[in-house]
Image (cartoon, rainbow, N blue to C red):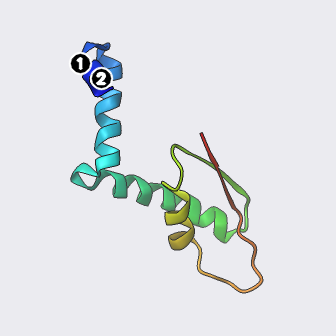
């Protein structure tokens, strides 16, 4: 119901605007945010630490991160667990 957004308080309108920018990848913002996340997660996974990631929508982050974060190592278990909210 995007027609209701202009009627909402300014902080909520701004959050909706930023969310739209992320999902539409305006000015490459979605890719930049995922890159920042990868920079944090790579050392954790390299150290074989367990990672619990909460993602905002099905398939938005986990498939991308699993492809790009950790090279496929035979016998090594995936240590990234994602929970969708």
Q: Position of residue 29 (x, y in %)?
A: 30, 51
Looking at the image, is 23 positioned above or below residue 10? below
Per the rendering, the mark at residue 13 is 2
Q: Is residue 85 left or right of residue 61?
A: right
Mark whose residue sits in front, 1 or 2: 1
Residue at 34% from the left image edge and 19% from the top image edge: 11
Residue at 34% from the left image edge and 46% from the top image edge: 22
Per the rendering, the mark at residue 27 is none
**Label 1 or label 2, whichever comes before in sequence order:** 1
Mark 1 = which residue? Answer: 6
Q: Are marks 1 and 2 in contact (CB under 8 Å)?
A: yes
Q: Please identify the quadrant where the N terminus is shown.
A: top left
Looking at the image, is 9 positioned above or below residue 54? above
Count residues near mark 2 (Cα–Cα under 10 Å), then give few for <14, some for 14-19, many for 20+: some
Residue 85 quadrant:
top right
How many numbered marks have been drawn onto this rendered protein structure? 2
Secondary structure at badge 2 equals helix
């Amino acid at each position: 119901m995007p027609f209701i957004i202009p009627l909402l308080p300014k902080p909520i309108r701004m959050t909706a605007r930023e969310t739209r920018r992320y999902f539409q990848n305006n000015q490459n913002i979605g890719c930049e945010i995922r890159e920042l996340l990868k920079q944090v997660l790579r050392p954790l996974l390299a150290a074989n630490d367990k990672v619990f990631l909460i993602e905002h929508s099905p398939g938005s982050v986990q498939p991308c991160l699993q492809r790009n974060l950790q090279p496929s190592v035979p016998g090594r278990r995936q240590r990234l667990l994602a929970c969708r909210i």
